[in-house]
Image: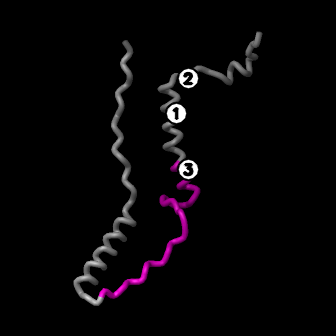
């Protein structure tokens, strides 16, 4: 027979799945906040900032205008913060 000692019994406690999932979700939400505070800013740095690509002359005013418009749009998209997906609230399970 294998019996649990008082130390082992206190280490293993019953935790409902819903509570376990809530705790896990809370830990996952807190983890990025801690890593952001360690880096010193809200942005996560992946690598060095690369120089801008050289601007090419297209030998045509309309092409140069279009190219500069595309470059400016790409800069705006790159500098925009990431959007979080809308989370759908889940209903609690109904017990029968």
Q: Name the magenta segment's main secondary structure.
A: loop
Task: For marks 3 and 2, give the CA distance.
Answer: 26 Å
Q: Residue at position x 33%, y 88% from top?
A: 57
Judging from the image, the colouring scheme is one colour
96 or 34: nearer the eye? Answer: 96
Q: Residue at x 53, y 63 (%)?
A: 45
Foreground disc of the pair 3, 2: 2
User: What's the distance in space between the residues labelled 3 and 1, CA to CA?
Assistant: 16 Å
Question: Where 21 sits versus 46, above or below?
Answer: above
The alpha-carbon separation of the residues under discs 1 and 2 comes to 10 Å
Q: Which residue matches tag 3?
A: 34
Furthest residue toward top: 1
- The residue singled out by tag 2 in the image is 15
Residue 39 pos. (x, y %) = 57, 59
Q: Residues within 10 Å of mark 1 (few under 14, many from 20)?
A: few
Which x, y percent locates residue 7? 74, 21
Q: Residues within 10 Å of mark 2 (few under 14, many from 20)?
A: few
Q: Secondary structure at mark 1?
A: helix
Kind of element beneath mark 3: helix
């Amino acid at each position: 027979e294998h019996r649990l000692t008082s130390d082992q019994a206190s280490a293993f406690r019953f935790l409902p799945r819903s509570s376990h999932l809530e705790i896990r979700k809370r830990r996952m939400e807190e983890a990025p906040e801690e890593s952001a505070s360690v880096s010193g800013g809200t942005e996560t740095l992946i690598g060095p900032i690369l120089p801008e690509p050289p601007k090419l002359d297209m030998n045509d005013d309309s092409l140069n205008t279009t190219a500069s418009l595309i470059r400016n749009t790409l800069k705006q998209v790159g500098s925009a913060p990431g959007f979080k997906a809308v989370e759908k609230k889940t209903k609690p399970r109904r017990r029968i």
